[in-house]
Amino acid sequence: MPGGRLTSEDRQHIATGLAEGLGYAEIGRSLGRPASTIMREVTRNGGPDDYGANQAHEATRHRARRRKQAQPPAPPVSDGGHGRDPQAVREFTESFTTLLEQQGLPRMAARVLVCLYITDSGTLTAADLVQRLRVSPASVSHAVTFLEQQGIIRRERTPGERRERYVIDDEIWLRSTLAAVQMNEALVVASQRGAEILGVATPAGARFGSSAEFLLLVSEALQKAVEEYRQRLTARNAARE
């Protein structure tokens, strides 16, 4: 099922695609999966040259059993309660983490992000994250560094406190979108340059030209959405005053 765990049939399909010389993106499209999911599956199971469907499926089952035995369920998040169902919170936490992972976010980065996301305060220390996620400090540090580089979270230190706190706020997707716009604009410029160098009248040049045209439309749409959101946010804040 698209979006769920890979089945034995999915892995057979991946193995066949690799044998035919298909790329991760093409295999992923045929399975309704992101290319990043296929890449991680192949990388952790021997790489493109040594990937075997049966071996990969058995190895995945073994890892799942080992994690289940080694890690007891994480305790429910307690942020004042608010009458929440702890089991429902746990299930949502796992499903949302899986969703972000399927979107291409590394597993540990997704876990750290969701742990912060569902916390009412929106702020936790490294020690908090280690305790809640039951992982090593190094794992938390690497995940935090990645998320900070993406502009998704930030570090803060309260005056008088020695420990840093990691913070997430209501503008998480705004900053993420702005970062995407910047990356997209860089692709527009590079594609336009490629069209010029290769010649707009050639097939390769025309391909770059079409790419630049589409990417420019995407950037304009994202910028429009950001501006509209900011206007709504300003109006909402003004209404509260």
Image (cartoon, rainbow, N blue to C red):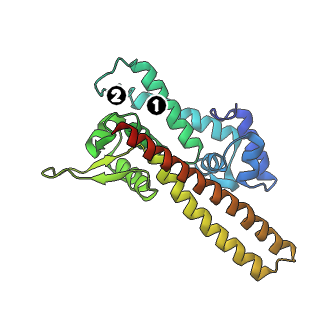
> Looking at the image, do the residues carrying marks 1 and 2 touch, with CB atoms under 8 Å apart?
yes
Tell me: residue 48, above or below residue 61.
below
> Looking at the image, which is closer to me, 15 or 208?
208
Q: Which mark is residue 93?
A: 1
Name which residue lies at 47% across and 53% down.
175
Helix, strand or loop at mark 1: helix
Name which residue lies at 78% across and 49% down.
17
Question: In the figure, is residue 193 to the left or right of 138?
Answer: right
Query: Which of the two discs, 1 and 2, labels the residue nearer the N terminus?
Result: 2
Tell me: residue 57, above or below residue 52.
above
Name which residue lies at 45% across and 47% down.
172
Badge 2 is on which residue?
77
Q: Position of residue 180 (x, y in %)?
A: 56, 57
> Looking at the image, which is closer to me, 236 or 155?
236
Q: Position of residue 94 (x, y in %)?
A: 49, 31
Name which residue lies at 30% across and 26% down.
78
Q: For the residue marked with disc 1, what is the amino acid?
A: Thr
Whether residue 108 can be seen here? no
